[in-house]
Image (cartoon, rainbow, N blue to C red):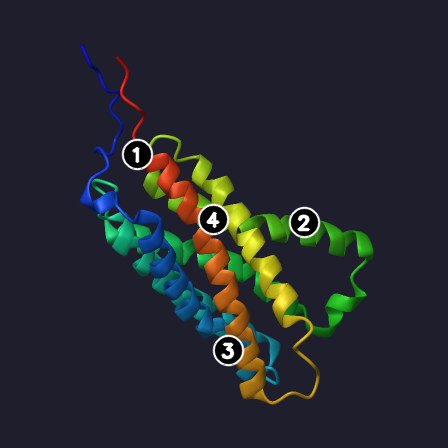
Amino acid sequence: MTTTTRYEVPGIGAPYQGLWRRWFINVTLGEFLGFAAPAMAGAFLRDATPAAAAVALLAAGAVEGTILGWFQARVLRSVVPGLRSGDWILATMIGALAAWSIGAIPVLAGDSFSTWPPTVVVLAAIVGGTVILLSIGVTQWLVLRHRLRRAGQWIWVTALAWLAGLLVFIAFTTPLWQSGQSIPLVAVIGIGGGLLMAAVMAAVTGAFLVRILRPPASTQ
C-alpha cells in the first residue's frame, strides 16, 4: 500500500514546473523596477532639505515594495493555495516602508550624524541593519504562516537574500559613484546596482521557495 504525506500544496504539476525560473524573472524585474524609484529619488534630491529627502525616500520605498509585491504575487498565487495578492502586496509594501524608515534616519540626521559617539553609531548600525534585513521577511511571513509549513524559515532566507543583494549593490556602486558626477550618471549607476541586487535576491529566495513547495517522496 502506498501512502503520501500531504502538504498544504498539491503535487508538482503545471503551476510548479519552471517555478524557480518564473520566480527569478518576475522578482528580478519587479525589484529592478521598484528600486528605480528610490534610486531616482536619491539622485535627484541630493540638494534637497533633509526632511524633503526623507519623505521622498519613504514614498519611493513604498512604491518599491508595492511593485515588488505585485510581481511576487503573480507567481505565488499560482502555487500557494488561498494566497490573496492584495495581502501579499500590502505586506511587502509595509516591510519595504519599515526598511526605508531606517534608511531615512541618516538623511534626517544630516551633518549631525558625524558627531554621534562611535558606540551609538555601531549600535544604531546593528539595530538598523537587522530591521532592514528582516522587515520584508517578517511582514511576508504574516501572510505565509497559515499557508505553508516551515513558513518561518522565510524570514531568515529573505534576510540572507537581501544581505547578499545589498553586498553586491555596494560592491558595484561604491567604486563607481564619485563626487561631482551628474545626476543622470548617479541614477544610472544606482539602477545598475539595483538590477544586480534584484537578481541575487531573486535567485536565493527562488531556490528556497522551490524547496519548501516540493512535496516529499512517496513511501511504501
- Residue at image coords 36%, 51%: 91
Estimate the spatial distance between the alpha carbons at disc 4 and disc 2, rounded to whole Å: 23 Å
> Which three-letter amino acid code belongs to the residue tagged 3?
Ala
**SS of the residue under disc 3:** helix
Estimate the spatial distance between the alpha carbons at disc 1 and disc 2, rounded to whole Å: 31 Å
Q: Position of residue 140 (x, y in %)?
A: 39, 46
**SS of the residue under disc 2:** helix
Residue occupied by mark 2: 126
Residue occupied by mark 1: 146
> Which three-letter amino acid code belongs to the residue tagged 1?
His
Residue occupied by mark 4: 204
Q: Residues within 10 Å of mark 2 (few under 14, many from 20)?
A: few
Q: Are marks 3 and 1 in contact (CB under 8 Å)?
A: no
- Mark whose residue sits in front, 4 or 2: 4
Estimate the spatial distance between the alpha carbons at disc 3 and disc 1, rounded to whole Å: 36 Å
> Which three-letter amino acid code belongs to the residue tagged 4?
Val
Q: Position of residue 37 (x, y in %)?
A: 44, 74
